[in-house]
Amino acid sequence: MSRFLQLHLLTFYPPSNVNRDDTGNPKTATVGGVTRLRISSQALKRAWRTSDIFSSALAGHMGQRTQRLGEEILGYLRDKNVEEKKAVAIAREVAGVYGKVKSEKDKNPARTEQLVFISPSERDAALAMADRLAAGEKVDLKKEQDTLLHRADSAADIALFGRMLASAPSFNREAAVQVAHAITTHRVTVEDDYYTAIDDLKQDEEDAGAGFLGEAGFGSGVFYLYLCINRDLLKKNLGEHGETGVAEAALGALAEAAMTVSPSGKQNSFAALARAGYVLAEKGNSQPRTLAGAFARPVGGTDLMEHSVKALKEFREELARVYGAGVDETCEMILGDKKSATLADIVAFCRS
């Protein structure tokens, strides 16, 4: 089996603002001396992980990133009629294994200070431990850490994207997939949308002014996105579940989501529900490499997608000439070429 799976995508987004910065404008980056639009890897991964594609393909194999595990334990104990003070103490004690809990005087004393990424089996273990404590069993949670935290399990999203547990770093999970920030292949100018809202109940004899004035930034362009998946590490993260089809389902879901799912920012205002126009999937055992260098010099012209595909292919060919092919198998999809692969072909290639 090839160790590495790499995905290169070119996706056109119409005027939109799917990923905002601290000022509310589209995120940007300066590349090749010019401004490019940018979509952060965090926004992309969040959109993919919470998509219907992931929830359907990986049902029962999805973790939860939350501060509220302790509150879930507390609710569980309340349903079992455990006395309130005792239930809160148990919830805080068990949740404290996963992260630092808030002060007892906090309005949410069972929550952790940090978000923690918990697998289904770890959630079940936490509830089982709460039962033991509620029954009066004396438990040293430090010695039971291996019971509550796992180094490998069936949570496909944790296996893919990794996790960090500040309170228990030995149970961190190294991400099997690396996701670059998507950037436009060309120069972009962020534009402003000046808009107004009218008061429907304003009378004709009143002033003609709007009830609200607003301003929103937007931009448009062809984005290059790169993903690299270490399939060996993915299976290691899944442990025994890596041999039951979960890894293949995770790879297929990741490829489909990357091609079809957009971040949710300002979608009600712009409906920028984009699909990849070009996808190159590669398998091999050699050191992976991004093809972002194809766009160090911004692409120009009227057909940005065509010129972006051309630049990517030319750069890839030059890398292969200098460094060797670097991959063993490829699958390519391009809109407009009826002989190229389809979404189903790319997904099958990534799963196989």
Image (cartoon, rainbow, N blue to C red):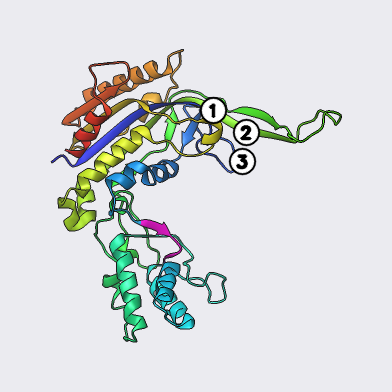
Q: Is residue 66 magenta?
A: yes
Label 3: how many residues lie within 10 Å, few (<14), some (14-19) or many (20+)?
few
Spatial CA distance of label 3 from label 1 is 15 Å
Where, quadrant-wise, is the N terminus in this rendering? top left
Pointer 2 or 3: first along the chain: 3
Q: Pointer 3: what residue?
A: 23
Looking at the rendered structure, the kind of residue marked 2 is: Ala
Q: Position of residue 337 (x, y in %)?
A: 28, 16
According to the picture, the residue beneath numbered tag 2 turns out to be: 216
Q: Looking at the picture, tell me which residue is in the foreground, 251 or 58.
A: 58
Seen from the viewer's position, the closer of residues 39 and 60 is: 60
Compared to residue 230, the image places residue 77 above or below, namely below
Q: Secondary structure at mark 1?
A: strand
Give me the residue at 23% from left, 44% from top: 249
Quarter of the image with the C terminus in it: top left
Residue drawn 33% across and 23% down?
A: 312
**Residue at image coords 19%, 48%:** 232
User: Among all residues in the image, which is located at the extreme top?
Assistant: 302
Q: Position of residue 177 (x, y in %)?
A: 30, 45
Whether residue 291 is visible to the viewer of this picture, yes or no, is no
Would you name the residue on which mark 1 appears? Answer: 219
Q: Indicate the position of residue 186 as horizontal and vertical percent values.
A: 46, 23
Q: Range of the magenta residues? A: 64-69
